[in-house]
Image (cartoon, rainbow, N blue to C red):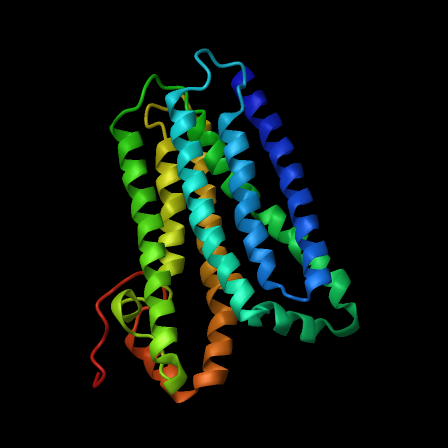
Amino acid sequence: MFLLLQLLVALVIAAVAFSMVMSVATLVERRTGNAGWVDTIWTFGLGAVCVGAALAPLGLEGWPAARQLLVAALVAAWSVRLGSHIAVRARKSGDDPRYAALRQQWGRHAERKMAMFLQMQALVSIPMIATALLAAHRPAPGLGLQDLVGLALVVAGIAGEAISDRQLRAFRETKAEKGRICDEGLWGWSRHPNYFFEWLTWVGLAVIALDVSGAYWIGWLALGGPACMYWLLVHVSGIPPLEEHMEARHRDAFRAYKARVSAFFPLPPKSSTA
């Protein structure tokens, strides 16, 4: 019971800290007029908060435990890789079309609603923070097979997302000006492979938190992180607004791509004559 109380207090502190991070993101968005920096700050900020939650002592013996160090390292690697990529994109490409569309929709209330929207992002990020916290503090001695499985999934997620981003960047530099849609490499198996591998990263962290014996039952709540990430990417702020933008830009070509290629999970593409 004492550990549960400690975990709850740590989660509340981390959630408040991340709300402050997104307040900074609000100020940066207003000053620069470039909402692309919002995702950069979200990624670096979430990484920093999750690392802090993972390394929190919580009165454990032998601090920091090997599992705490593992989870902190994995989250840091995810954050640095993705945050750096988004930062480069924001500097080169300018405003994010998803946020630009929201500003236009909100009109004169854009500043106030953007601030509220970014605080909602902080709120829905709490399950991801909880996943890292619960994984790092699973009370089992040493690292076992379960930790290695989680490690493998996180590494696969980070590597797959990096490969997806690299393939898309190479395509844009060579063929995007011809009006084509990237359907090469992983993008021929999923319309959003970067989103899939992002989700897989959090699945791996959740695996580290699970305890099939039932002694650490609260660890199962770590599944809320990848569940929330899936919901956001597939149904809210990821695929829907991005595909609306792509369909308005590419019209029939994008509709054909949608009919041929899976939206999220990488699957063999359907025949173009199907």
Q: Is residue 199 left or right of residue 101?
A: left
**Which residue is rendered at x = 33% and y = 83% of the image?**
256
User: Residue 139's x, y, as percent?
Assistant: 41, 19
Residue toward you, 86 or 157:
86
**Which residue is rendered at x = 54% and y = 38% of the image?**
48
Q: Outermost residue toward the right? A: 108
Q: Is residue 144 left or right of residue 242?
A: left
Residue 141: quarter of image: top left
Q: Is residue 202 above or below residue 60?
A: below
Q: Is residue 82 left or right of residue 145?
A: right
Q: Is there any visible trace of residue 1 in the rendered image?
A: no
**Which residue is rendered at x = 27% and y = 72% of the image?**
184
Q: Is there any visible trace of residue 149 in the rendered image?
A: yes
User: Residue 208's x, y, as percent?
Assistant: 36, 33
Q: Is residue 126 above or below residue 98?
A: above
**Which residue is rendered at x = 48% and y = 53% of the image?**
84
Which quadrant, please, contains the N terminus?
Answer: top right
Which quadrant, please, contains the C terminus?
Answer: bottom left
